[in-house]
Image (cartoon, rainbow, N blue to C red):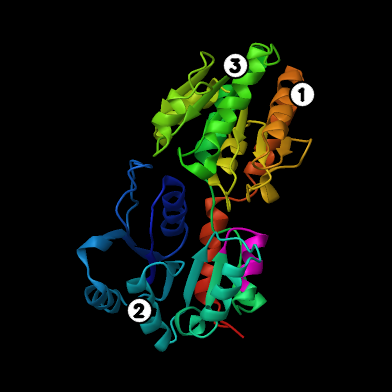
Amino acid sequence: MKKVLFLYTELAPYFLAGVERLVQDHDVEVHLVRWPVNREAPFHLRFAERVTVYERTAYDDAGLLALVRTIAPDIAFASGWVDKGYLRACRALRKRSIPVVMCSDTAWRGDARQWLAVAAARTWLSSAFSHAWVTGEAQAAYARKLSFAARAVRTGFYAADVDRFADIGARTATAKAARYPHRFLCVARYIPTKGHQQLCDAFAALCDTGDAGDWELWIAGTGELEEAVKASPGGRHPRIRHLGFVQADDLGGVIAESGVFVLPSTYEPWGVVVQEMACAGLPLLLSSAVGARERFLEDAVNGHVFRAGDAASLRMMLRMMVLSGDDELRAMGARSHVLGRSWTPRRWAATVMDLLHDRHGQA
């Protein structure tokens, strides 16, 4: 039985859906080293059989290296290069010609900081990694800048738990056919780059001018800015609800009462939640900074794009959704459902196996 090692940072249910598919569809066992659960995303996690979990905090760098040597994986995946202990283990595996995959959602922006990172990384990257597995095309461009050969780069590193969210869409379709819910939904951590304050202010302004119709705004999440946003004039508007953190198992009820998903991020390299909401059949309203729109949003077909950080653009697109007829919104949601199901945990697991058997490595 082949052994697959993941040296991971923050786990989420969607990642474990891919891991579960991996052990169910393929003759492998999975070893997973993880960082502590993020307090701003306290997911309840379930692990499949043939998955062994190790806490990163239980090992210093030397202990981690000893653990990796004991596991003796046939392939390893590491979350970027943020953990120096992970890097040390990756180098040790590469010396034994084991394929090691750098996983990343960082998009190429071409700024001075990234060019410096490229110059520095080129001197050591090949000693730690043979392949790169990234989320989308902007991330693949960055990987190629880092000197990964095109044949050693894969996209699609993030895949939603498609079955879970597609089932939510199927179960709510009848009710939405009878009465379409006039409610915007945002699911995101309350951190500066997610744009909660601007969203609340824009929606509250629409309400106050009578341009929001009978629509409401619900926001699910927690984080450092939650209390500040909730206490702000916009955040306190009576037609805005702050739901707090909602576990994946409980999100279906929220989605059932929602009509449009909105993500106003000013920085969002990917955003798995976009695929999740698409699978559930929601029209999408995304800022231009959201990376996942390349795969899951067809502008003016299943939703709209607005300029990231531009309050007027956001308000205009919120208003456009309010003015859309219910049949039009249902048609948008149907297209979202199709696009959301285009990349699955099963295909994610197949990519793991493709990488395991690919011995080309870097040029």
Label 3: few (<14), some (14–19) or many (≥20) C-alpha neighbours in 10 Å: few
Q: Secondary structure at mark 3?
A: helix
Residue beneath disc 3 = 175
Q: CA distance from mark 1 to mark 3?
A: 16 Å
Residue 129 location (% of width, % of height): 48, 78
Residue beneath disc 1 = 328
Q: Secondary structure at mark 1?
A: helix
Q: Earlier in the sequence, mark 2 or mark 3?
A: 2
Which residues are the magenta region? Answer: 134-143
Depth check: 1 or 80 in front? 80
Which label number is shown at residue 23? Answer: none
Q: Is residue 78 magenta?
A: no
- Relative vertical location of residue 361 with respect to residue 292 in this rendering, above or below: below
Q: Earlier in the sequence, mark 1 or mark 3?
A: 3
**Snapshot quadrant of residue 206:** top right
Residue beneath disc 2 = 88
Residue 343 location (% of width, % of height): 61, 51
Q: Residue at x 79, y 35 (%)?
A: 300
Q: Please name which of the two marks, 1 or 2, marks the residue nearer to the observer.
A: 2
What residue type is disc 1 on? Answer: Glu
Residue 299 location (% of width, % of height): 77, 40
What residue type is disc 3 on? Answer: Ala
Q: Residue at x 34, y 45 (%)?
A: 45
Q: Tags 1 and 3 in contact by the CB under 8 Å rule?
A: no
Does residue 62 appear to the left or right of 79 in the view shown?
A: left
